[in-house]
Amino acid sequence: MAQQDPTPGCPRGEEQLPAFTWEVRANDRRYHVRSKKKFAFCLSKKKYRGNAIKTAKYNILTFLPLNLYEQFHRMANVYFVFVILLQTFPEISTLPWYTLLFPLSCLLLIRGLRDLIDDIGRHQSDRSINSRPCEILSGKSFQRQKWRDICVGDIVRLRKESFVPADMLLLCSSEPSSLCYVETADIDGETNLKFRQALLVTHQELGSEESMAAFDGTVRCEEPNSRLHSFTGTLEWRGETHPLDSERVLLRGCRLRNTDVCYGLVIYAGFDSKIMRNCGKIKRKKTKLDRMMDRLVIVIFLLLLVTSLCLAVASGFWARRFQEKHSYLAAVYKNTTPAQQAFFNFWGFTILLSIIIPMSMYITLEFIYLVNSFFINWDLEMYYAVKDIPAKARSTSLNDQLGQIEYIFSDKTGTLTQNIMSFKKCCVNGTIYGPGTVHENKQPPGSGLTRDHHGEQKVDVTLLEAAQRDSDPVLREFLRLLALCHTVMVEDRGDQLVYQAASPDEEALVLAARTLGYVFLARTQDTITISELGRTRTYQVLAMLDFNSDRKRMSVLVRDPQGTIRLYTKGADTVILERLRGRGPSEAITERALDLFAEETLRTLCMASKEVSEAEYQEWGRRHHEATVLLQDRARELDRLYEEMEQNLQLLGATAIEDKLQDRVPETIQLLKLGNIKVWVLTGDKQETAINIGYACKLLTEDMEILEEKEISEILQAYWVSNNNLSGHGEAPASSHLSWEHPEASCHKGRAIIISGDFLDKILHAGEVLKEQKGWPWRWLPRGRTGGSQEQGSLVEKAFVDLATSCQAVICCRVTPKQKALIVQLVKKHKKAITLAIGDGANDVNMIKTADIGVGISGLEGLQAVQCSDYALAQFSHLQRLLLVHGRWAYLRICKFLRCFFYKTFAGLMAQVWFAFHSGFTAQPLFEGWFLALYNIFYTSYPVLSVGLLEQDVSAKKSLEFPELYMIGQQDKLFNYRVFGATLLHGVGTSLTSFYIALWAFEDHVGSKAVGDYESFSVTVAVSALLSVLVEIILDTKFWTALSFLMVTVSLLFFCLFSFLTQSIDAFKIAPAIFCFPDASRNALTDPYVLFVVLLTLVVNTIPSLTVHAFRAIVGKPTIQQKIHQKAKQEPEPSVELRAHAPRGSFRRRSSYAFSHQEGYAGLITRGDSLRARATH
């Protein structure tokens, strides 16, 4: 595929043709099925994919090999297989081979079943999507089939409210001029409707099923790609070539709105469609603790090898000295030398000590993860009763990472907001009307029309009464403006008016005007008809001055039935107020009202009008007509004329529209901030809308300094200059550490960043731009050698990330799904932070897959986000409980579980090493084989299991009251290499005490029953270690339940039960080689001397822990909770005012203007393209 897209609109140029390598022939399945493309050496595959999608990872044939391959990426599993292979050699085996094979098989089976269950869910969701109904042209008629049956080149019929199943060229529709209205909220997050229009030739020629069946046009376009907002190609039909662009294409995932029927030619299907190209791949996610455990396994294995090697070398020296001392036993050693014995003992010790990495720990971990996931599923505080949607943990292996999140990347539309716009307040002629007393929607007298339920608007009773009195001329003009100045289309369905609005803001205003008695009835190409308190009036539309993002306003020039010409204008306060004829008391009150509306984070628009004389209109109209037919600079000339007309306005008032947030969104974000979690909003919506929502959800505050793209560039330039001066002439600094030379580059709570997708592209592709010698966006960054371009690009990335992460809030607007994922990847790459992404639509899938934790909002229109997520929630507000309660508890429980498990393993089994020093380094086991097998499974696992399942340091309520407690997980304080080292030393100390006190006791003394034998010694050491471990776990447990007591009791009962069974005389008689400790526990533990030794060992092992606990309680540092209280009391007020690096805009008052609209609708109306014939009156 060519590196650069051909210029749209110039398809006939010969230089563009090679770029169009994707050829689609209408109604020619055979061609697309036979087409192949090379992908490796001489191999080829189908060029055109089917429309079926597959997010599942396995099938019947690939499940076993792929799942095993993934599982053996865990170092522990590789280690266990290695030890099992060693056990198959009888010369070196000290334990039966099946002692590890059975638990390893159980572990692989449990994880495999979990992965299988997860994948079955993905198969079901894939089947649900692929089985959606559609209508495909087959022969000369449309047949009802499934999405999966669609092929490239097919013609598909879509009906109103249906989703687009593939990327299609719009051929024609039931709307005038073959317009088609689509909602792209699931793709780019924008809620306003967008229009697409078919080519004139297909609109005119393809009016019947027979003509479509005979259609044999060929589309040549670019190869499948991820660029959502661009498309370039041509349609060749009947010897003519027609240019195609993105305005002619319907993308998969769009929803058909306000259009009864449309027809499309499939260009890209399935995974070739643009939205699927933006979805990314499913990757197995590992938690930070998982990765740490992999490294610890390597460390423990190396320690084990070093220990085994030392003991093996010692065994060689001991064997040689023993043979020299006892030469009369030479016949016993005639077949082995000391070196051979050392070699065999090395592997024997490796097998004997292999239980230091207990497989049961991994099995227990899986169970803990599973149960903690059930706790999330069962939490009624995260149950959304309105739609009967509970929280769901779709992944069961990431719970602990929920307690370590540092950055949350959130979508806006459908995640923070409800996608509902409602007219809330207004200020007219200096009077503010608010919701105050809510009045039911009554039928304005004489309107003679009923309203659809969706259109009902609640308004202030005072405003309704004032409108019906009709005594205020300014209010009358204000309501007329609402009913006249818009691009809404209307359809009269008998006794019901149905509005078709491209903008939810405009729909809310027109509905409010209708509720107040000014009903928009109909429009034609040059007229608009409204009902004013029951009186029908038709206005002649002389001109529509269209909205765009630069003008931030739209106007309509109309002639009323009396012949008076008036201009009605609505737009941002920043542009309307500076175009007023004068300022008076009414204008001052309106400005104060705008301040109040902004404080309530409502979306504001100012309304103004003026009367235009006939002479002025005739002169302006003549120049306007001349400008509309210009071939060059048409847009610039029209903007100049619009500017000229929109002067000397009279302010009528201002409106305030509420973009409804989901419940408790601001409170949730504030709570997350207190937990040191930074929230970034990534949206495809416009900047004004994103900023307005930022203020509404308290992500942005009035005292924040906003850094926009200009200021960010200046800060990055200052950083580059300072580092360049330190590191050399024009080269990247040798150190990757960024030393910001400017004090304002440090972390400020009062700073926020707002950037666009285009600016982000400059950051992300800085290295590529340098390498390709394209236009360089950073003039202060010199172009270096090609080899250093990537290094310089990475430096720009890191500088930006350091700046962004030092700010309290970041908002990225106009970003594509791929850019969302790249932002997440950027933070993960440069900050090594744990990230969470949350969204509800297909445009969030890639971001959700890229983040360490992906959360899907369920219950809304799209299911793609939930299908690819790790956790599904019904509301954004449930995130606070998921992280601050379940996440923090899970991290606490897993960390404490790992500490306890490693401690009990080292404390109980390291005695094998000390015993080697007293058994001639012969790799002889100290303990009974059954004790080794059952120690980690039954004797000590249940108390640590209760810790992993139920441990709490504070209650759920306190966790939410003190979100600062969450920072412990972010800082890895509960389990790290230092904690592991301390646990290792603690366990080694316990094992030393247990072994040598027993050895000292058995060395020169015997009890009343002469229990000085090896078996009794083994039992004494085992019981001492076991009880010491249980007491230590009891002391370390903070949250006790009946289950906790039961677990400790069950452990002791299991020890007694299995000791009786495995050490019985009957068992010894049946299999003396397997049950080789007959009556050992009964002989030892009925002797008072042995019991005294056990008690002494227990006291010696417990005293250090009790001492540490007492020391911390008396003279140690205050607890986290105490620190939080002290911090709240001692937090000083900031002594200086924080200022941005570059000054913000010149406006003293923050504008809360936001308006969802797409440029071009006014042109459609004035050309008559969007008007049905029956709409005329």
Image (cartoon, helix red, strand yellow):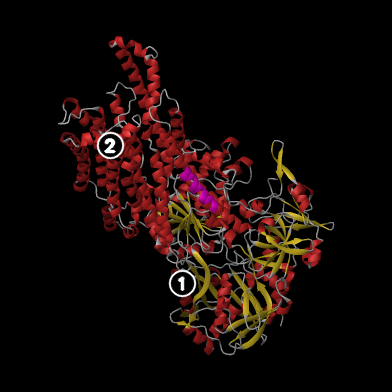
Say few, some or many: other residues with alpha carbon within 10 Å of mark 2 (under 14 / 14 to 19 / 20 or more): many
- Numbered disc in front, either 1 or 2: 2
Choose between 922 and 1165: the one closer to the eye. Answer: 922
Picture disc at residue 597: 1
- Say what secondary structure mark 2 lies in: helix
* Residue located beneath label 2 in the image: 986
Which kind of residue does numbered mark 2 sit on? His
65 over 599 or under it: above or below: above
1043 over 184 or under it: above or below: above
- Say what secondary structure mark 1 lies in: helix
Residue 205 location, x and y as percent?
A: 81, 65
Q: Does the magenta stretch include residue 130?
A: no
Q: How far apart are marks 1 and 2 (CA)?
A: 62 Å
Q: Is residue 116 magenta?
A: yes
Image quadrant in which you'd find residue 179: bottom right
Instruction: Tell me, yes or no, if residue 1041 can be seen here.
Output: no
Q: Is the magenta stretch mostly helix, strand or loop?
A: helix
Residue 775 location, x and y as percent?
A: 63, 46
Picture disc at residue 780: none
Which range is magenta? 109-120
Instruction: Tell me, yes or no, if residue 190 can be seen here.
Output: yes
Which kind of residue does numbered mark 1 sit on? Phe
The N terminus appears in which quarter of the rendering? top right
Choose between 1031 and 4: the one closer to the eye. Answer: 1031
1154 over 710 or under it: above or below: below
Does the CB distance between marks 1 and 2 fall below 8 Å?
no
Residue 3 location, x and y as percent?
A: 68, 45
The C terminus appears in which quarter of the rendering? bottom right
| Horizontal arrangement in the rendering, residue 906 relative to residue 1007 (left or right) | right
